[in-house]
């Protein structure tokens, strides 16, 4: 059988089992959102059709990473540096009430309450490859809102060339920020055209459930063609700026972690190859997988980087 592998956006209608559907109702209930028949259509998940990508045949789906692995093998240095630390320690994070401040080059500064994100913007489910700069990967069914729709709501001015995202840094609930592990608060950034790409999500959930704390509750960025560290967790601020913002890992080691950090099998990390990856859950003796350009999303995103030297702008 020939499998179509060239498109990575799968309409949720193709993959939604009844079981998942009920999970989603559970998701909405857990978020405190009513599921009366009047509300449900507004919170539709089946938005990906409007992105005009060819649907992928169901048999070509790479196997989803188990929920257990996706929630127990994490990077979230605010809760420790070991992969198992976030699952153990992130229960102290308080995710309600939670607001995101919108600042900088916008018509008017605004504050977005987390629950308004749900009511103002439609939720979508997206199954994306998640490729970490440490050369491991997962496949995760995220639930989130289109970052582009949120950007439009923020009403950036013509001066907004980049977006800076800022995480919470609360020493009372995040033990890691008391240590000089990284430059706190964790910050990340995207060029505004990258951020406006339809694949970019603000995720509020995964696997049909609310985002667990260790995965960046209540809201984190998902940019599937970039290394995982661009996916900033527990976002409290979005700032529209004219200059390229500083980013945490770039500050920590500018030779190793660039601003762009697009997944690229041809540009190695100074200390290891990026041409292959270990898929979490494959088992210790499984063959490594070939890493795909832009993590397999080249067809959708390569136009963003036309004419750029990707070795220089890594
Ligand atoms: N966001 C914050 N605030 N703090 C972090 O330490 N780690 C990043 C990114 N977002 C990190 C963060 C890194 S290095 C990766 S690989 C991904 O989150 C990991 O996401 P996951 O744990 O959901 O797989």
Image: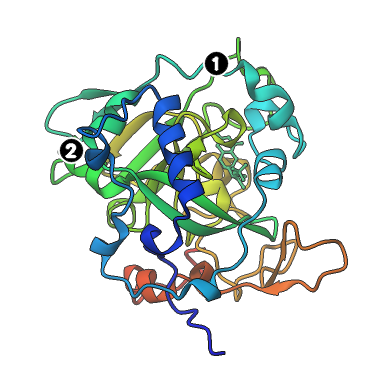
Q: Position of residue 59 (x, y in %)?
A: 54, 75
The image quadrant of residue 104 is top left
In the rendered structure, the answer to whether residue 237 lies left or right of residue 261 reads: left
| On screen, residue 248 above or below 99 | below
In the rendered structure, the answer to whether residue 175 lies left or right of residue 156 reads: right
Task: Look at 54% across and 65% down and name the residue there.
Answer: 263
> Circle 2: is it few (<14), some (14-19), or many (20+) Cα within 10 Å?
few
The CA span between labels 1 and 2 is 28 Å
The image quadrant of residue 237 is top left
Mark 1 — residue?
170
Q: Which mark is residue 38?
A: none
In the rendered structure, the answer to whether residue 287 lies left or right of residue 260 reads: right
Determine the residue located farthest toward the top in the rendered image. 172
Q: Dot 2 lies on which element?
A: helix
In the rendered structure, the answer to whether residue 124 lies left or right of residue 148 reads: right
| On screen, residue 294 above or below 5 | above
């Amino acid at each position: 059988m020939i499998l179509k592998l060239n498109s990575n956006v799968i309409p949720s209608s193709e993959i939604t089992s009844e079981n998942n559907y009920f999970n989603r109702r559970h998701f909405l209930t857990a978020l405190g959102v009513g599921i009366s028949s009047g509300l449900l259509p507004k919170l539709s998940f089946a938005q990906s059709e409007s992105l005009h990508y060819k649907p992928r045949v169901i048999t070509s789906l790479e196997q989803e990473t188990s929920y257990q692995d996706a929630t127990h093998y994490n990077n979230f240095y605010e809760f420790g540096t070991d992969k198992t630390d976030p699952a153990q320690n992130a229960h102290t994070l308080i995710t309600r009430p939670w607001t995101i401040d919108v600042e900088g080059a916008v018509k008017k500064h605004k504050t977005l309450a987390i629950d308004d994100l749900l009511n103002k913007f439609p939720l979508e489910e997206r199954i994306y490859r998640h490729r970490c700069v440490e050369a491991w990967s997962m496949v995760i069914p995220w639930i989130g809102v289109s970052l582009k729709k949120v950007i439009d709501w923020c009403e950036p001015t013509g001066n907004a060339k980049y977006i800076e995202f800022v995480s919470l840094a609360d020493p009372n609930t995040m033990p890691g920020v008391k240590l000089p592990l990284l430059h706190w608060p964790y910050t990340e950034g995207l060029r505004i055209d990258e951020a406006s790409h339809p694949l970019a999500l603000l995720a509020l959930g995964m696997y049909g459930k609310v985002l667990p704390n260790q995965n960046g509750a209540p809201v984190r960025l998902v940019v599937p063609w970039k290394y995982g560290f661009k996916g900033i967790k527990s976002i409290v601020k979005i700032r529209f700026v004219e200059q390229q913002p500083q980013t945490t890992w770039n500050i920590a080691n500018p030779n190793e972690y660039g601003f762009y950090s697009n997944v690229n099998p041809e540009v190695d990390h100074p200390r290891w190859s990026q041409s292959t990856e270990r898929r979490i859950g494959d088992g210790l003796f499984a063959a490594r997988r070939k890493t795909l350009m832009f993590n397999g999303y080249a067809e959708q995103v390569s136009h963003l980087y036309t004419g750029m030297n990707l070795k220089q702008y890594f």
